[in-house]
Structures are given as structure tokens and as C-alpha cells.
Image (spheres, helix red, strand yellow):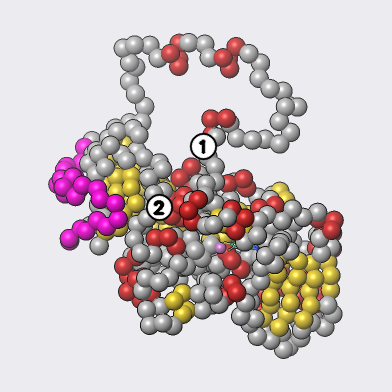
């Protein structure tokens, strides 16, 4: 196999050397006692000498001061103004499958609406027997359900269509979060209003200054959509649409209308801005793909990665990452450490839920030579995550949305990782 590394330019010579190197014996994670005494053991630390804060000091708990770097980050040059912009989930700092509420990426077109729930209403109108208006209290009196779902913006990895660009999985893959929603099945609310037989589409609308709208087919609305008011057990954060948002499992994040104030029932799609000039993919032949709602299976190695280098030197190491599919579960993820010459099946750990993030691990002995890391997701329909070149063959290079190609990280002898492409 000829390996061509595109994007940034790591040393190819070193990689070839790595391929020839023999693996070394396993090394335990701990260390033998050093000659010199370890101050972390023999000296009295301040936290052993003074009383800590009492139970009245932290009415709403926050992370340790030593976790201050674990934050959402934006890419300033991506957008003209932060009120119509995006920040990214720090995937390289997380484990398991649940995204903590304060770290869920944010994407808004007109800033965060700060809504008084007492003044918020949800209206159902259009092709229904009885147009209805619900208060938040009304919504709470419907039977509710709990489901864990990922939300991925269709533009996730969009900057990578033409080549490796952003250095970190937070930036290349961080327009995703995975939380447990509590909400009312949209079907129950639509049935309450009584959808006329001519009602084939819905148009959810947000209460923010962008009044965002998307057309959604009635089959999806009646299937698994939720009108959600809780995430991970507590009220939605204002950033995520407090007091109520639409949950459209497996489908592109843009359709998950936040600050949901109105649902119109119609007999055809509306062809609004977000489904014409945006969230469509211009192909090489000048035609555009439209209504590409489902998110294809995808995965990324989160550690090591450019923001999470290997810091411990050769020996036993843990590689981990996440995988997801808008069409079901992820029964299998393959990983390679040599740019695709050899693939092994990763170890999945954690709940395998429909349209939710999955966590995988691969433990191996690093011999200290350069690595080309990739992961490849298989979903429950049998679909296998494609390479970026396979995607470009079909869709050209004009697209921004729906880039689910295989990601490569090059790791050098020092453990420093970079975003590259190989072909
Ligand atoms: N809903 C409203 N009302 N306004 C918005 O700007 N942005 C959409 C969608 N819903 C948006 C919205 C987009 S493009 C995405 S990817 C998701 O919300 C982002 O959800 P999050 O901010 O909870 O991550
Ligand atoms: Co989006």
C-alpha cells in the first residue's frame, strides 16, 4: 500500500520506520518506588490540614478548579459574529457516552433566547381539527418518556471536505452531544389537535429572533420525535432551547428546533431557507442533494488526538473514541494504528442505545514509533463508515454538510498528534 499523507506534513520516513519496528513488551501503568521520596506522598498537602467547604458553599455544583480547561471552544474565523455561530463539545476531555449539560456544543442563528417559561406558549395550527395552545404546565400533563439521543449538526466536520484543516477532534467532530431527554412524544400532541388526513408535513418554529423553521414529514413526527423539556434530568439549558425543544432522533441537528413555540401542519414542505440555500449539498454536476435528513454512521478517535497527545512515553496505552448512527446502534468499530494496513475490532463499553453515541476502546503497547490512527464504524443496518475519498468520489468537493468520512490522526515519536489525510 502506498501511503500519501495530505494536509499537514509529518515525516513519512519515520512512519515507514515504525511499520518495520517490532512491538515491545507490555508495561504496567504504575511505577516502581523511586530512589528519591515523592513529595506527593511524604509531604502534607494543604487539603489534609484544613477543613473544606461546607454543604452550604456550593448550592449548584461545579467541576474542580483543575478542570478549568474542559470547556466549549469556538473557531473565531469561522463566522462573522458570535450570535450566529457555533462552539464545540470538548470530546477529547470526555468519557462514557453522556455529554454533561454545560459542555454540549451550541449552535444558534440569533443568539440565546432567555425565555420566561410562564410566558412561553406552544401553538399547533394549520391542517388540524382543533388548533391548540399549550402552556408549559399543559405539556407536563401528557405522558412523558426518557430517551438518550445524539444531536449532530449536519455541518459537523464540514471544514474538512477539501482536506485536513482543524487540529483537534473538538473542532473536527465537536458539533455533537448526547444526552438523555425527557419529553412528550410529538405524536400525542398532534393527536390532541387532530391532524387532518391532508396533513402530511409539519413546520416547527423557534421563538428566538431567528424564528427558525424546518419542514418535517408527518411519518417522522408521528414516529419518535419528542417535545422535550429536560436534558440529563434537569431543565434544558437556555443554550439548548429552554424551556422546550424538538428532538428529532437520528436526523440532522438543524431540525431540532429550540425554544419551540409553534408547529404548523401542512400538506407539503415549505422550502424555507434552512432547507434550500442551507443544509443542501451541491454536487459536481450542479444538482443539489436535498432533504438529506438522516445522519450516517460516523466515528472518531478522541484520545489520542491533537488536543490530547500521548504524554506517558512508550508502553501500555489506552485509545478511545465515540461512534454513532442516525439509523440505529453501533455493534462494531474497527481501529487501525498503521493507517489501514491492519484493522482490529475495538472493545465497546457502555449502553448500546438506538440513535445514541457509543464508546469504544483499544488497549495496546505503543513501541514509541509514529502512528496513523483511524476508526471505522459499522451500524446495525450493515452500513460501514466510508473514507473521505469515497465520499468525494460520489459528492465532489462543494459540500459542507454530511461529512462522515474516516478521520486520521498522525502521532509522532513524541506523542504529538496532528490532523492528516492518507490515501
Ligand atoms: N433552533 C432555533 N430556534 N434556532 C437556532 O438557531 N439552530 C439549529 C438547531 N435548532 C437553531 C435551532 C442547529 S443548526 C443545530 S445544529 C441545533 O439546533 C444545535 O443544538 P444545540 O445548540 O443544542 O447544540
Ligand atoms: Co446545525
Residue drawn 84% across and 73% down? 132
Q: Where is residue 77 in the image (x, y as percent from the top left)?
A: 48, 53
Q: Give the vertical position of 98 relative to 125 (above or below).
A: above
Q: Give the vertical position of 303 relative to 2 (above or below).
A: above
Residue that label 1 marks: 69
Q: Is residue 239 visible?
A: yes
Q: Report the span colored magenta.
A: 1-24
Q: In which quarter of the image is residue 164?
A: bottom left
> Is residue 122 on the magenta stretch?
no
Mark earlier in primary sequence (2, 1) = 1
Residue that label 2 marks: 166
Q: Do the residues labelled 2 and 1 touch (CB within 8 Å)?
A: no
Residue drawn 42% across and 64% down? 404
What is the secondary structure assignment of the residue under circle 1? Answer: loop
Q: Is residue 270 left or right of residue 19?
A: right
Q: How far apart are marks 2 and 1 (CA)?
A: 19 Å
Q: In this view, does 17 lie to the left or right of 357?
A: left
Query: Dot 1, how many residues are within 10 Å of its Cα: few (below 14), some (14-19), or many (20+)?
Result: few
Query: Dot 2, how many residues are within 10 Å of its Cα: few (below 14), some (14-19), or many (20+)?
Result: some
Amino acid at each position: 500500500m502506498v501511503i500519501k499523507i495530505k494536509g499537514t506534513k509529518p515525516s513519512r520516513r519515520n512512519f515507514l520506520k515504525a511499520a518495520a519496528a517490532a512491538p515491545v513488551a507490555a508495561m504496567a501503568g504504575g511505577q516502581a518506588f523511586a530512589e528519591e521520596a515523592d513529595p506527593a506522598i511524604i509531604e502534607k498537602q494543604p487539603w489534609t490540614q484544613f477543613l473544606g467547604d461546607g454543604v452550604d458553599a456550593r448550592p449548584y455544583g461545579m467541576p474542580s478548579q483543575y478542570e478549568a480547561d474542559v470547556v466549549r471552544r469556538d473557531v473565531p474565523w469561522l463566522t462573522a459574529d458570535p450570535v450566529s455561530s457555533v462552539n464545540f463539545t470538548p470530546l477529547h476531555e470526555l468519557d462514557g457516552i453522556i455529554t454533561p449539560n454545560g459542555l454540549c456544543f451550541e449552535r444558534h442563528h440569533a443568539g440565546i433566547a432567555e425565555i420566561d417559561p410562564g410566558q412561553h406558549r406552544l401553538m399547533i395550527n394549520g391542517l388540524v381539527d382543533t388548533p391548540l395552545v399549550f402552556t408549559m404546565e399543559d405539556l407536563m400533563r401528557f405522558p412523558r418518556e426518557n430517551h438518550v439521543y445524539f444531536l449532530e449538526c449536519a455541518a459537523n466536520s464540514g471544514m474538512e471536505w477539501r482536506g485536513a484543516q482543524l487540529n483537534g477532534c473538538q473542532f473536527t467532530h465537536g458539533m455533537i452531544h448526547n444526552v438523555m431527554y425527557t419529553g412528550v412524544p410529538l405524536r400525542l400532541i398532534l393527536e390532541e389537535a387532530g391532524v387532518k388526513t391532508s396533513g402530511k408535513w409539519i413546520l416547527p418554529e423557534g421563538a428566538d429572533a431567528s424564528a427558525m423553521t424546518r419542514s418535517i414529514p408527518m411519518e417522522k413526527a408521528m414516529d419518535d420525535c419528542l417535545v422535550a423539556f429536560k436534558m440529563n434530568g434537569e431543565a434544558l439549558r437556555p443554550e439548548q432551547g429552554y424551556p422546550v425543544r424538538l428532538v428529532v432522533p437520528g436526523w440532522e441537528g438543524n431540525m431540532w428546533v429550540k425554544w419551540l413555540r409553534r408547529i404548523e401542519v401542512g400538506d407539503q414542505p415549505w422550502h424555507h431557507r434552512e432547507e434550500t440555500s442551507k443544509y443542501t449539498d451541491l454536487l459536481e454536476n450542479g444538482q443539489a442533494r436535498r432533504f438529506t435528513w438522516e445522519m450516517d454512521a460516523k466515528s472518531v478517535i478522541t484520545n489520542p488526538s491533537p488536543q490530547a497527545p500521548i504524554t506517558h512515553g512508550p508502553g501500555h496505552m489506552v485509545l478511545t473514541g465515540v461512534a454513532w448512527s442516525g439509523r440505529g446502534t453501533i455493534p462494531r468499530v474497527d481501529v487501525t494504528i498503521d493507517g489501514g494496513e491492519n484493522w482490529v475490532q475495538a472493545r465497546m463499553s457502555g449502553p448500546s442505545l438506538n440513535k445514541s453515541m457509543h464508546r469504544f476502546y483499544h488497549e495496546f503497547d505503543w513501541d514509541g514509533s509514529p502512528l496513523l490512527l483511524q476508526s471505522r464504524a459499522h451500524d446495525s443496518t450493515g452500513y460501514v463508515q466510508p473514507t473521505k475519498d469515497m465520499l468525494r468520489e460520489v459528492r465532489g468537493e462543494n459540500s459542507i454538510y454530511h461529512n462522515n468520512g474516516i478521520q486520521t490522526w498522525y502521532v509522532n515519536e513524541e506523542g504529538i498528534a496532528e490532523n492528516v489525510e492518507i490515501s
